[in-house]
Image (cartoon, coloured by chain):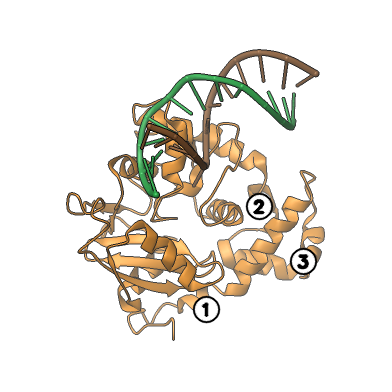
Chain colours: A orange, B brown, C green
Amino acid sequence: MTLRSASYSPTLPAPADRWPEEDYATVVETIRFLGETGGRPPSVAETARAVGLAEPQLRVLLRRWAGLSPEAFLEASTPGHIRALLDASPALGAARASDLFIACEAPPVGAFERGGAGLAMGYGFHPSPFGEAVLIATELGLMGLGFVEGAREAVLEDFRRRWPKAGFSQDQEATAPFALRVFDPAQWRPERPLRLAFLGSAFDVAVWEALLSIEMRRATTYGAIAAQLGKPRAARAVGAAVGRNPVSFVAPCHRVFGASGALTGYHWGLTRKQAIIAWEAGLPAG
DNA sequence: TCTGCATATCCAG
DNA sequence: CTGGATATGCAGA
């Protein structure tokens, strides 16, 4: 099976070239190493050595991956970075929909309660800056985004469990345009909003919609989302709902932390959450 | 019904 | 700074 598709623009490099798997693998190794140093900030040279690269190689890799210098990457991986994000973030609610410019579609009433029956889900696997991603497209737009860790079938099973009555079939052609766009900041433009639909319980959908109002380079806490929903005691329920976010990355559940600044959790692995946070630190402000 | 959460807060060492 | 107890809303079974 090929991951490339004729629908890719000829002027853009194919995603496999844009986001080489080895880059993310090195990023993962780097984050693991930082975890082992336990608070002490390591030098760039030491970090490069730990992941088996010369310092200039690491520099080039991080520049290609996220436009980051190694120094900036290391800084963005510290607890202090999360604190700074939280401190710099305004209250939820006032912000615009999302940097990705989302058009939120509503599935038919009761579709979730009926297990997604009647919905045709086309899935596809695509390279991303955070390893291989699985995307799920329907006629309502993007409905699922997750990441492959191990077997592709395991990720699919994750989604089948959420919507057991939906029809699943592979459709790389349907998901490819979403994959290209979602992971390419240059394509986050308002003229052609990304169509997206949330399939979940009323409460979960409300939480996921709140995620869309967390802007790029900003962050929030579970308690703040609960307060925004008018249920200030529901922080824990919010945490559970955030953990069920079906459209990872696009609905930025990676920007939610504990009130203490702790990373807390991530459905697709805490390492990936850290990687996404670091990657976003490399985006141009705006 | 009851159980388990990607929480938050308080209180003791 | 760490750990236990407690209040809490919701989804899934």
Chain letter for the residue marked with disc 1 in the picture: A
Q: Percent from the top left, x then y, of residue A232?
A: 41, 25
Task: Give the structural element (helix, strand or loop) at label 1.
Answer: helix
Task: Give the structural element (helix, strand or loop) at label 3.
Answer: helix
**Looking at the image, do the residues carrying marks 1 and 3 touch, with CB atoms under 8 Å apart?**
no
Q: Which residue is mark 3?
A: A55
Which residue is found at the position 58% from the left and 65% from the top? A65
Q: Quadrant of the N terminus of chain A?
A: bottom left
Asked if A167 appears above or below A242 in the picture, the reply is below
Count residues near mark 1 (Cα–Cα under 10 Å), then give few for <14, some for 14-19, many for 20+: few
Decide which of A145, A129 is in the foreground and name it. Answer: A145
Which residue is found at the position 79% from the left and 63% from the top? A50
Chain letter for the residue marked with disc 3 in the picture: A
Q: Which residue is mark 1?
A: A17
* Residue type highlighted by circle 1: Asp
Asked if A285 appears above or below A186 in the picture, the reply is above
